[in-house]
Image (spheres, helix red, strand yellow):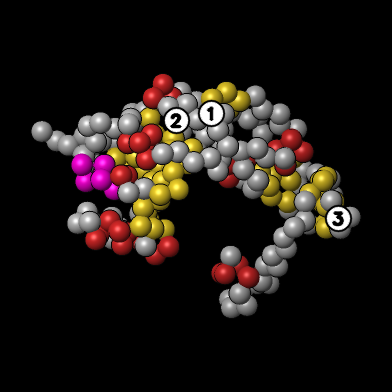
């Protein structure tokens, strides 16, 4: 956001406007009407409004979804606390990393955030070990739920998860592939146009190790 809105560099800086709820979009003219009566006109309109996308419906995509066979819990770990406990400092690599295989339902994805001060963990496991399909996105889960699916997890990673905070379900859904992602001057991007049920492994740049300790 800072890069897009700053005056440095070529081009016109982006103007960020919030609290404008869209009520309709003309896909031919690019005219957007907002709930407060304000209208805007653009040559290109992109909807990045998530898995429950409203813009997706505007361009004629009405999806049917079903819960994935996988569940996921998200947890945050502070690097400072982990290091104080003598645990590995996973903040040194700024790439997205994962434990587990491409085709395994059990996998853990790690993304360092805030300059490495915060470690963001996405922990995937079979839905039979925990079903969060009906949970709200901001629902809290106990650390016991986070650890239970991984009894044989490498203890260094396990102990990271054991100090996890803000443990919340990341609901996974299966969508059939969409017939199109664009109509007129309106398109969708991000999770609004991402009809898959598991994490896109192509984004994972570094492989740490199997989930279990090598013997």
Q: Earlier in the sequence, mark 1 or mark 2?
A: 2
The answer to the question of whether label 1 and label 2 lie on touching residues, with beta carbons closer than 8 A, is: yes
Q: Name above or below for residue 209 compared with residue 34.
A: above
Q: Is residue 137 visible?
A: yes
CA gap between label 1 and label 2 equals 8 Å
Q: Earlier in the sequence, mark 1 or mark 3?
A: 3
Q: Earlier in the sequence, mark 2 or mark 3?
A: 3
Q: Name the residue carrying label 1.
A: 133
Residue 22 lies, in percent from the top left, at 79, 49
If the image is split into quadrants, where does the C terminus sit? top left
The image's mark for residue 71 is: 2
Relative horizontal placement of residue 50, taking residue 25 as reference (left or right): left
* Badge 2: residue crowd in 10 Å (few <14, some 14–19, many ≥20): many
Q: Name above or below for residue 207 compared with residue 92.
A: above
* Badge 3: residue crowd in 10 Å (few <14, some 14–19, many ≥20): few
CA gap between label 1 and label 3 equals 34 Å
Query: What residue is rendered at 45% in x and 38% in y?
Result: 141
Predominant SS along the magenta part: helix
Q: Is residue 43 visible?
A: no
Residue 114 lies, in percent from the top left, at 43, 62
Residue range corresponding to the magenta coloring: 155-160
Query: What residue is rendered at 83% in x and 45% in y?
Result: 24
The answer to the question of whether label 1 and label 3 lie on touching residues, with beta carbons closer than 8 A, is: no
Q: Name the residue carrying label 3.
A: 36
Query: What residue is rendered at 86% in x and 55% in y?
Result: 36
Marks 1, 3: nearer the viewer: 1
């Amino acid at each position: 956001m800072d890069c897009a809105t700053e005056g440095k560099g070529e081009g016109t800086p982006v103007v960020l406007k919030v609290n404008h709820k869209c009520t309709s979009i003309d896909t031919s003219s690019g005219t957007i009407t907002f709930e407060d009566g304000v209208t805007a006109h653009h040559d290109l309109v992109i909807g990045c409004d998530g898995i429950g996308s409203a813009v997706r419906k505007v361009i004629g995509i009405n999806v049917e979804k079903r819960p994935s066979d996988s569940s996921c819990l998200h947890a945050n770990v502070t690097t400072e606390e982990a290091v104080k406990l003598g645990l590995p400092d996973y903040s040194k690599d700024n790439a997205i990393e994962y434990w587990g295989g491409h085709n395994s339902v059990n996998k853990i994805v790690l993304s360092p955030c805030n300059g490495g001060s915060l470690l963001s963990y996405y922990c995937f496991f079979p839905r039979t070990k925990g079903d969060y399909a009906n949970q709200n996105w901001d629902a809290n889960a106990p650390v016991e739920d986070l650890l239970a699916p991984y009894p044989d997890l490498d203890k260094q990673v396990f102990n990271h998860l054991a100090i996890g905070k803000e443990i919340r379900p990341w609901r996974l859904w299966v969508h059939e592939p969409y017939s199109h992602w664009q109509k007129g001057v309106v398109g969708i991007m991000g999770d609004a146009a991402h009809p898959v049920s598991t994490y896109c492994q192509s984004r994972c740049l570094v492989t740490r190790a199997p989930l279990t300790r090598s013997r």
